[in-house]
Image: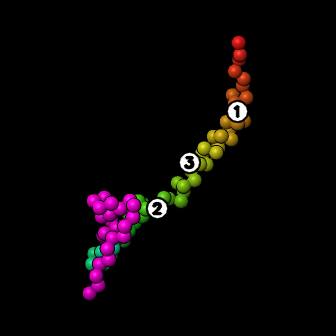
């Protein structure tokens, strides 16, 4: 009989949090394998950002800055008295 491993400690996995629970289920060797797989998939959402989301905000910001530099409004001068 194998002994269940302890839940790995991560900064986000504070006791009582959903991530802590999911990691405990994932590492419980006595749990049903399908349940462990579902817990691993759910915990991954807490631990890893999606690759597609990583550069979207930076890309939109860069595009907005590029468009803003070429805008006719960016070259206008404020009238002085």
Query: Regarding mark 1 in the picture, which secondary structure is present there?
Result: loop
Q: Quadrant of residue 15?
A: bottom left
Q: Which residues are magenta?
A: 1-26
The image position of residue 42, as x and y in percent, is: 38, 63
Query: Regarding mark 3 in the picture, which secondary structure is present there?
Result: helix
Which residue position holds label 1?
Answer: 71
* Residue 58 tag number: none
Question: Sequence order check: which comes first, mark 3 or mark 2?
Answer: 2
Q: Camera-side residue: 4 or 43?
A: 4
The image position of residue 40, as x and y in percent, is: 38, 68
Q: Camera-side residue: 20 or 52?
A: 20
**Disc 3 to disc 1, C-alpha distance:** 21 Å
Question: Sequence order check: which comes first, mark 3 or mark 1?
Answer: 3
Residue 36 visible from this viewpoint = no
Could you tell whether 44 is left or right of 35 in the image? right
Quadrant where the N terminus is found in the figure: bottom left
Q: Residues within 10 Å of mark 3 (few under 14, many from 20)?
A: few
């Amino acid at each position: 009989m194998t002994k269940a491993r302890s839940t790995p400690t991560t900064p986000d996995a504070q006791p009582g949090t959903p991530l802590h629970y999911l990691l405990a289920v994932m590492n419980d060797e006595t749990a049903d394998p399908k349940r462990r797989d579902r817990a691993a998939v759910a915990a991954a959402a807490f631990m890893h950002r999606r690759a597609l989301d990583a550069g979207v905000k930076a890309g939109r910001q860069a595009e907005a800055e590029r468009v803003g530099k070429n805008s006719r409004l960016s070259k206008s001068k404020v009238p002085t008295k």
